[in-house]
Image (cartoon, rainbow, N blue to C red):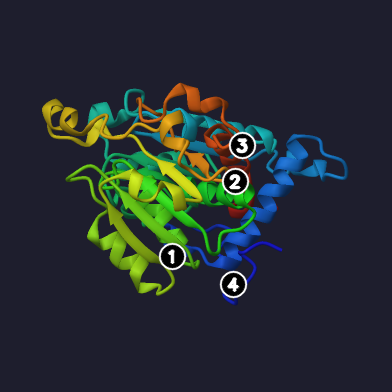
């Protein structure tokens, strides 16, 4: 049994909006991960797998609406829907009527007429929650500015569980831009359900926001620490979660260049780490993990990306009440 078994609250699923990790309990996370395992087994044709999973969303349509660039989230949602036997339609800012002055609300309302489920990424924090009030179809948040990225946090947690075999008792170090990194915001909030230690290592000015730390603290289970040097915590770290400095969130290139390259994880840095420490990154990377690390058994970031498809398959199927 996994660390996510120990709960009493019921899951949130069929027909529901997935806007924040706050909606999830240990029980619903555990249920999602069991479904992700089922999806993984079916995709890889493992002995005894349930192949019906690969047709459970037949005739269903997913609308992908991305107002910010995306490779992994966009493609993994598309692949997830295709793997489930469904199909998808895709809209971005350059191809939508937003260029004609159409509001986000109207665009999403129209797309809801053609689809069964919508996935939205938008640069404005809070935009996904705002537009959800106007929809009669379920909506999944694929990132809202520097707010949240709940599906990334779920696949990250799934990866931690698969890599380490547990969540409880781990020391997880988040390194890089934690001010604008919505992936770290969501993951920290999700980890608040577990007894873990969270270390935050950042360049000056890119510290984890106080409101995120307050939400984590309110759970009463997590020890939080802040550092300016990875050397202070690398030897005790079980999971090293690296993030890029997000150029698109800075007011000027000069401000970005002051902090870009502050931390680089390479073979020398990892020589001080536990042999069991796994290295994660939501990607894309921009120099913060040296390519030489890719060959390390502990480099989990491409396994992390694959896990994202399985978790998103499970989430789509659950929200559409098909799994």
Label 4 sits on a secondary structure element that is: loop
Marks 3/4 in contact by CB < 8 Å: the verdict is no
Mark 3 or 2, nearer chain start: 3
Mark 3 vs mark 4, foreground winner is 4
The residue at the point 36 percent across, 28 percent down is: 69
Q: Which residue is mark 3?
A: 81
Secondary element at image label 2: helix
> So how many labels did they put on this image?
4
Q: Which residue is mark 4?
A: 10
> Which badge, 2 or 1, comes first in the chain's sequence?
1
Mark 1 highlights which residue? 192
Foreground disc of the pair 4, 1: 1
Contact between marks 3 and 1 (CB within 8 A): the answer is no
User: Residue 18 vs residue 33: left or right?
Assistant: left
Front: mark 3 or 1: 1
How many residues crowd around disc 1 within 10 Å: few (fewer than 14), some, or many (20 or more)? many
Task: Specify which label sits upstream in the sequence, 3 or 1.
Answer: 3
The Cα–Cα distance between marks 3 and 1, rounded to whole angstroms, is 30 Å
Please tell me which residue is depicted at 57% across the width and 75% down the height of the picture.
Answer: 9
Residue closer to the observer: 17 or 154: 154
Q: Which residue does the image show at 38% across and 43% down from the upper left?
A: 143
Viewer-proximal residue among 103 and 294? 294
Label of residue 311 in the image: 2
Can residue 134 be seen at all in this image of the molecule?
no
Is 320 positioned to the left or the right of 261 in the image? right
Residue 125 vs 11, above or below: the answer is: above
- Mark 2 and mark 3 in contact (Cβ < 8 Å)? no
């Amino acid at each position: 049994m996994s660390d996510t078994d120990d709960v009493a609250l019921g899951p949130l699923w069929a027909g529901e909006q997935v806007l924040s990790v706050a909606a999830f309990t240990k029980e619903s996370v555990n249920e999602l991960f069991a479904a992700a395992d089922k999806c993984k087994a079916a995709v890889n044709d493992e002995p005894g797998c349930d192949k019906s999973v690969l047709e459970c969303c037949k005739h269903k349509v997913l609308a992908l609406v991305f107002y910010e660039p995306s490779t992994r989230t966009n493609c993994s949602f598309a692949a997830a829907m295709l793997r489930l036997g469904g199909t998808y339609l895709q809209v971005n800012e350059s191809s939508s009527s937003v260029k004609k002055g159409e509001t986000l609300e109207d665009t999403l309302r129209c797309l809801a007429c053609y689809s069964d489920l919508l996935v939205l990424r938008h640069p404005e924090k809070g935009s996904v929650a705002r537009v959800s009030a106007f929809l009669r179809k379920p909506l999944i948040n694929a990132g809202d500015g520097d707010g949240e990225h709940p599906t990334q946090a779920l696949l990250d947690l799934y990866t931690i569980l698969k890599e380490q075999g547990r969540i409880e008792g781990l020391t997880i170090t988040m390194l890089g831009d934690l001010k604008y990194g919505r992936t770290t915001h969501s993951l920290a909030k999700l980890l608040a359900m577990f007894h873990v230690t969270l270390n935050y290592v950042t360049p000056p000015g890119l510290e984890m926001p106080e409101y995120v730390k307050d939400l984590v603290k309110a759970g009463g289970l997590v020890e939080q620490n802040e550092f300016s040097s990875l050397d202070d915590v690398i030897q005790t770290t079980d999971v090293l979660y690296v993030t890029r400095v997000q150029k698109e969130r800075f007011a000027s290139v000069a401000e970005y260049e002051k902090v870009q390259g502050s931390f680089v994880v390479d073979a020398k840095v990892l020589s001080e780490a536990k042999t069991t420490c796994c290295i994660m990154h939501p990607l894309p990377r921009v120099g913060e993990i040296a390519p030489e690390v890719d060959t390390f058994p502990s480099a989990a970031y491409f396994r992390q990306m694959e896990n994202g498809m399985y978790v998103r398959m499970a989430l789509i199927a659950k929200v559409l009440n098909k799994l």
